[in-house]
Image (cartoon, rainbow, N blue to C red):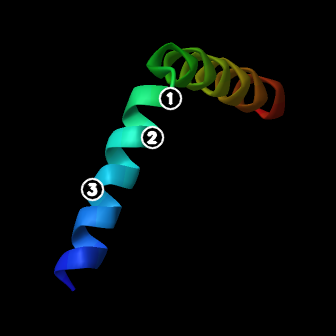
Amino acid sequence: MSEENTDNRSFLEKVEQEFDWNLIAIVSVWIFMLTTFFLIFVG
């Protein structure tokens, strides 16, 4: 179990280091805009 935990930690650290958090912000904004447009269009 302890070995799996360390592997998961290193995996999460690797993902956090390689992942571009700006991409999350851009995608979130686009999803928000598209959702708002869809609601206005349907409504």
Which residue is labeled 2 in the image? 15
Amino acid at dot 1: Phe
Of helix, strand and loop, which one carries label 1? loop
What residue appears at the point 74 percent right and 21 percent down from the top-left corner? 37
Compared to 11, does 40 lie above or below? above
Side (left or right) of 2 relative to 37: left
What's the distance in space between the residues labelled 3 and 2, CA to CA?
Answer: 10 Å
Amino acid at dot 3: Arg
Contact between marks 1 and 3 (CB within 8 A): the answer is no
What residue appears at the point 23 percent right and 71 percent down from the top-left corner? 5
Q: Judge depth for marks 1 and 3 and give the one in front.
A: 3
Contact between marks 2 and 1 (CB within 8 A): the answer is yes
Circle number at residue 19: 1
| Other residues around mark 2 within 10 Å, as few (<14) / some (14–19) / many (≥20) | few
Which residue is labeled 3 in the image? 9
Instruction: Mark 3 or mark 2: name the one nearer the start of the chain.
Output: 3
Side (left or right) of 42 relative to 7: right
